[in-house]
Structures are given as C-alpha cells and as structure tokens.
Image: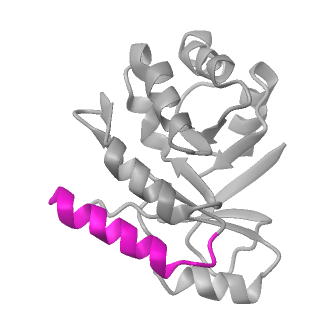
C-alpha cells in the first residue's frame, strides 16, 4: 500500500508527494525542480489546477503550458476537466492532456467525489478510455466509519477493478487507518 502526501514545503520529504497547495492548486513552479534536486529518489506528482482563471480557453492553455514546463514530474493531477457541475467531462481537453502527459500518470483530482453517484461509473469509464491512471476521492472531514458514506466509494472501487486506481484523500494517518480497516486500497493520499 502506497501513501502519497500532499505538500507545499521544500523542507518536507516523503517517498511519494503531491506538490500542491491545500486547495490542490498549482504549487510555486520553482518547487518541483528544487524538490527533485534535493530528493531525486522521491516520486513527485504536481497539481495543475488554476482556480483563478474563469475563461475556459485560457485555462486549458495555462494547464497545458504548466504541464510542459514540468517535464520532471512523475504525474499530474487536475480537477478542471469536469463541466456542468461535475455532470460531464471535457473529453477533447482530457484527450489533449493525455497526449501531452504521455506515459506519466494522469490523475483526476479529488473533486471527482462531487460527481453525482449515479454518474460516477460512467465518467470513470470515460476517463479509463482516455488513459487516465487514477481518480482521487475526497473523504477529508468525513467519518470513515459511516457505511452510507463509504458505499458509493466501495461500488466505484469494484467497478474500477484494476483498470484505474481509486485514490481516497484523507486528512490524517488516523483517518487512513480507519478507512483501510473497512475498504482496502492500493494508494491513499494524506492531505490536511
């Protein structure tokens, strides 16, 4: 089981990290190169969300150029592929991102948990067909012992099989252990 820590500090060192601010927005762009120089053995994922940009055309270009600038990253995370209140995926944009990211990891961000439950399996299949390697599911602030809350996540994990990684996002080590006692996962993200 792999644990990925979200971090926006050069002084933290984890074997696997998501470089992002607390809201999963793009980190300071000097951080990934500096982290790589200090800790070349660590696995680095970079969030490429730019929440401030309202124009869809400009936003897609900013995300694409950010990915091109970060050629040393092991993977990229974005929430800004969803449309219409998380009811649809911008498939042309996802296809373009998939081509640019290539053989590195392409992960849909934690706002996937806002997709209505009845659409989650269909949207997951669309992401699989565009070579997305993982989907994050936000459980921060939730009770990991609440079966009603975990039921959609468990169904999504069963539907995903081994085609795509489902990555729950928890707030701390205690929540991670409580979640894993109910549902086993191969990867978990800790983000306070």
**Between 146 and 28, which is closer to the camera in this rendering?**
28
**Between 148 and 89, which is closer to the camera in this rendering?**
89
The image quadrant of residue 177 is top right
Tell me which residue sits at (57%, 78%) in the image: 71
Magenta stretch bounds: 54-73
Q: Is residue 98 left or right of residue 93?
A: right
Tell me which residue sits at (40%, 19%) in the image: 119
Q: Main secondary structure of the magenta part?
A: helix
Tell me which residue sits at (65%, 36%) in the image: 164
| Percent of width and height locating residue 58 | 20, 67
**Between 16 and 165, which is closer to the camera in this rendering?**
165
| Percent of width and height locating residue 134 | 61, 43
Note whether 175 is above or below 37 in the view shown. Answer: above
Q: Is residue 80 visible?
A: no
Note whether 66 is above or below 96 in the view shown. Answer: below
**Between 41 and 5, which is closer to the camera in this rendering?**
41
Note whether 122 is above or below 138 in the view shown. Answer: above
Q: Is residue 152 left or right of residue 12?
A: left
Q: Is 132 included in the stretch rendered in magenta?
A: no
Q: Is 63 included in the stretch rendered in magenta?
A: yes
| Percent of width and height locating residue 68 | 47, 76
Q: Is residue 167 left or right of residue 99?
A: right
């Amino acid at each position: 089981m792999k644990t990925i820590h979200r971090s926006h500090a050069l002084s933290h060192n984890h074997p696997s990290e998501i470089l992002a601010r607390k809201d999963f927005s793009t980190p300071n762009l000097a951080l990934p190169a500096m982290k790589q120089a200090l800790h070349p053995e660590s696995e680095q994922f970079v969030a490429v969300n730019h929440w401030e940009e309202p124009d869809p055309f400009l936003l897609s270009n900013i995300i694409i150029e950010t990915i091109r600038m970060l050629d040393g990253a092991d993977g990229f995370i974005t929430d800004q592929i969803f449309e219409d209140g998380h009811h649809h995926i911008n498939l042309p944009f996802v296809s373009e991102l998939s081509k640019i990211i290539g053989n590195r990891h392409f992960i849909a961000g934690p706002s996937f948990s806002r997709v209505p439950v009845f659409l989650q399996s269909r949207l997951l299949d669309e992401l699989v067909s565009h070579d997305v390697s993982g989907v994050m599911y936000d459980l921060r602030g939730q009770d990991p012992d609440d079966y009603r809350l975990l039921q959609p996540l468990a169904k999504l994990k069963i539907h995903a099989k081994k085609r795509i990684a489902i990555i729950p996002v928890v707030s701390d080590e205690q929540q991670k252990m409580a979640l894993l006692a109910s549902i086993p996962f191969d990867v978990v993200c800790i983000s306070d």
